Image (tube, rainbow, N blue to C red):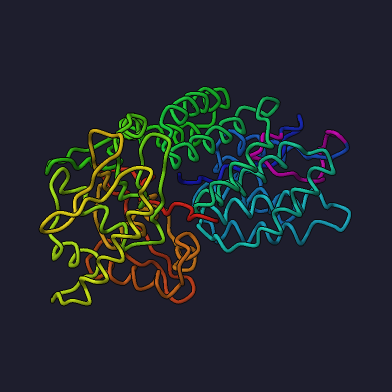
């Protein structure tokens, strides 16, 4: 789910919809709001930003250098897509606010955190965001404190830490919040549901997000909701059975997983049947054997074929046969509640215990670097370090994957040195939730 920066500073009526950060006194022609003095140009610029009009905001504060104007200019530049300039302006504003203006500085930190998320700077210090959230809560700015939590949740969602994201989300009640922040809440709910393969929950959350976005009247927010909803209409995986295959949407996958069919899930590297899930994500040899057996079901697979698939061996000798017997024994133990492994004259066959059918759920794109492509398919520019964090791999591994993809023309670099980013246009025809790295057992 892409992140568009929509933060705007507070207006004279105390607007705090979770997309906004605070300002302090400006110049002359001021009026008071909750103890904060706001001049008319700052107020008008804040209203323009809250309504998604960054050019209108800049026309009012472009030449001003006071802290509130710097912050507003930073937000406007972020909405226009110049994230580097926006970050620099917000940092200047944060430093310019006085020591007694902790609330304003905290709001600048939240704005910078959203820019970091939008630019996929996943290594941005989350401790700063948590400290800013604590300050906002102490000062009674619950809306911006909630927004800070949503930013932290969206980061967790990007790097696949779904359990932590769900725990943080459970502590937030969107009911008293303004429409824009309620829409952000439902987008997070939908994002988690899609990664959990719960299409029904995702549809309901997006319906609520659409209503909240229309109430908020922010075009960028409504466009984001529409974009996420469109993802649910695209193929998310392939169903492979009896030598044939067909595309499945997320709704179809949810139905399949609840049907009682034995599913060898090549997207998550698990074997499923109804509510029982056996993870083989950390045991690639066992999963390769399970997939080969599922592809041949109800027939058997020759030992030589299993050895080639699991061990990638060109030549078969007795050591390979002995290893195969060991790995088959391990797979038999892992799948004992779901299926047995029956020895035949030439090899082995899968024998489901309850299910009458065996299918394979495969990614729409079978590629060595498909997970990297899935992350880049959101259209944002990623650094190799951010990709490594999201993949749970070393930065060198991420860089090698990017180099392979660049050689094939599937990704392209932007910038040089430490500023280099990688991106690709959204890949047409398929969606990414099943390709994104799932949390491993114990995470």
Looking at the image, which residue is at 63% across and 42% down? 167
Residue 158 horizontal/vertical position (percent): 50, 51
Q: Tell me the quarter of the image containing the N terminus.
A: top left
Left/right placement of residue 279 relative to residue 240 reads right
Q: Quadrant of residue 287?
A: bottom left
> Who's the residue at 36% across and 48% down the image?
336
Question: Is residue 70 found left or right of 165 in the rendered image?
Answer: right
> Is 25 part of what is drawn in magenta?
yes
Depth check, front residue: 314 or 239: 314
Measured from the top left, where is residue 175 in percent x and y?
A: 67, 25
Q: Residue at x 76, y 62 (%)?
A: 95
Q: Main secondary structure of the magenta part?
A: loop
Q: Which of the image's four quarters has the C terminus?
A: bottom right
**Direction from residue 336 to residue 390 in the image, left or right:** right
Lateral position of residue 351 relative to residue 160, left or right: left
366 and 355: which one is in front?
355
Place of residue 349 in the rendered image (x, y in percent of width and height, measured from the top left)? 19, 50
Which segment is the magenta one?
16-34
Q: Nearer the viewer, residue 183 or 80?
A: 183
Q: Measured along the vertical axis of the image, is residue 366 above or below residue 169?
A: below
Residue 86's place in the image compared with 414, above or below, is above
Is residue 100 located in the magenta-colored stretch of the structure? no
Q: x and y percent of residue 87 in the render?
A: 61, 59
| Relative depth, front residue between 118 and 71 | 118
**Residue 371 versus residue 277 in the image, above or below:** below
């Amino acid at each position: 789910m892409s992140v568009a920066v929509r933060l705007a500073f507070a207006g004279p009526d105390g607007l705090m919809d979770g997309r906004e950060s605070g300002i302090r006194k400006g110049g002359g022609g001021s009026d008071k709001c909750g103890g904060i003095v706001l001049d008319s140009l700052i107020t008008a610029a804040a209203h323009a930003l809250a309504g998604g009009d960054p050019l209108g905001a800049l026309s009012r504060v472009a030449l001003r250098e006071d802290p509130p104007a710097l912050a507003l200019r930073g937000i406007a530049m972020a909405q226009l897509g110049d994230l580097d300039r926006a970050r620099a302006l917000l940092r200047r504003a944060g430093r310019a606010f006085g020591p007694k203006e902790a609330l304003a500085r905290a709001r600048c930190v939240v704005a910078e955190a959203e820019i970091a998320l939008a630019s996929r700077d996943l290594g941005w210090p989350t401790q700063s965001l948590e400290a800013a959230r604590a300050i906002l809560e102490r000062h009674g700015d619950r809306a911006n404190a909630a927004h800070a939590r949503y930013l932290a949740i969206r980061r967790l969602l990007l790097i696949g830490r779904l359990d932590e994201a769900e725990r943080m989300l459970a502590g937030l009640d969107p009911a008293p919040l303004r429409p824009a922040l309620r829409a952000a809440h439902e987008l997070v709910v939908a994002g988690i549901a899609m990664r959990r393969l719960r299409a029904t929950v995702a549809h309901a959350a997006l319906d609520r997000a659409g209503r909240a976005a229309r109430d908020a009247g922010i075009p960028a927010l409504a466009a984001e909701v529409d974009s996420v909803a469109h993802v649910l209409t695209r193929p998310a995986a392939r169903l492979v059975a009896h030598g044939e295959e067909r595309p499945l949407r997320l709704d179809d996958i949810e139905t399949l997983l609840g049907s009682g069919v034995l599913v060898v899930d090549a997207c998550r590297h698990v074997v499923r049947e109804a509510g029982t899930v056996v993870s083989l994500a950390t045991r690639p040899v066992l999963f390769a054997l399970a997939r080969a057996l599922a592809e041949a079901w109800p027939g058997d697979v020759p030992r030589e074929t299993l050895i080639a698939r699991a061990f990638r061996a060109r030549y078969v000798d007795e050591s390979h046969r002995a290893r195969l017997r060991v790995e088959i024994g391990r797979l038999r133990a892992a799948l004992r509640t779901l299926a047995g492994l029956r020895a035949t004259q030439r090899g082995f066959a899968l024998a489901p215990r309850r299910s009458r059918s065996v299918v394979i759920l495969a990614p729409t794109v079978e590629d060595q670097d498909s997970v990297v492509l899935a992350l880049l398919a959101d259209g944002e520019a990623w650094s190799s370090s951010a990709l490594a964090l999201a993949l749970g791999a070393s930065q060198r591994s991420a860089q090698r994957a990017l180099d392979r993809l660049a050689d094939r023309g599937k990704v392209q670099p932007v910038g040089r040195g430490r500023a280099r980013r990688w991106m690709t246009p959204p890949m047409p025809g398929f969606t990414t939730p099943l390709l994104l790295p799932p949390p491993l057992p114990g995470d």
